Image: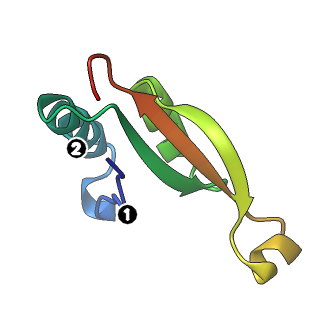
Amino acid sequence: LELLRMSVSKDYRGRGVARALCGEVLRFARARGYGAVVLSTSMVQVAAQRLYESHGFRKVGVTGLSPLGDLLCIQIFRYRCELPGGT
């Protein structure tokens, strides 16, 4: 399962909304037998990286965003969370 573009409005950040959403994605994936959840986030999204890592995601790769991103040294981190018992 791939988690794409999760974001929380600035008005609601710091209230545990992202933590709850991430937990729900993992519960959803486990309940449906997925073996893992994958996602990408940019190097500047430090809070997102911490959130994902606290839920068991591990960094599995690094890529450039685009030729312009490479020029600006902006990297995209790939994360994966293995789900026990999945297929």
Sequence order check, earlier mark of 2 and 1: 1
Hey, which quadrant is residue 7 in on the image? bottom left
Across and down, in percent, residue 12 comes to 24, 55
Q: Residues within 10 Å of mark 1 (few under 14, many from 20)?
A: few
> In the drawing, does residue 44 fall left or right of residue 29?
right
Across and down, in percent, residue 16 comes to 26, 38
Q: Compute the Cα span from label 2 to label 1.
A: 12 Å
Q: Is residue 46 visible?
A: no
Identify which amino acid the numbered label 1 is placed on: Arg
Across and down, in percent, residue 76 comes to 65, 58
Q: Which residue is mark 2?
A: 21
User: In the image, is residue 70 above or below residue 77?
Assistant: below
Q: Residue at x 19, y 31 (%)?
A: 33
- Report the front residue among 49 and 47: 49
Farthest-out residue, front: 87
Q: Residue at x 54, y 55 (%)?
A: 41
Question: Tag 2's secondary structure?
Answer: helix
Across and down, in percent, residue 59 comes to 61, 36
| Number of the label disc, if any, that sits on residue 5 | 1
- Report the front residue among 43 and 14: 43
Farthest-out residue, right: 71
Identify which amino acid the numbered label 2 is placed on: Leu
Q: Residue at x 37, y 60 (%)?
A: 4
Q: Is residue 29 visible?
A: yes
Q: Residues within 10 Å of mark 2 (few under 14, many from 20)?
A: some
User: In the image, is residue 12 above or below residue 38?
Assistant: below
Question: Tag 1's secondary structure?
Answer: loop
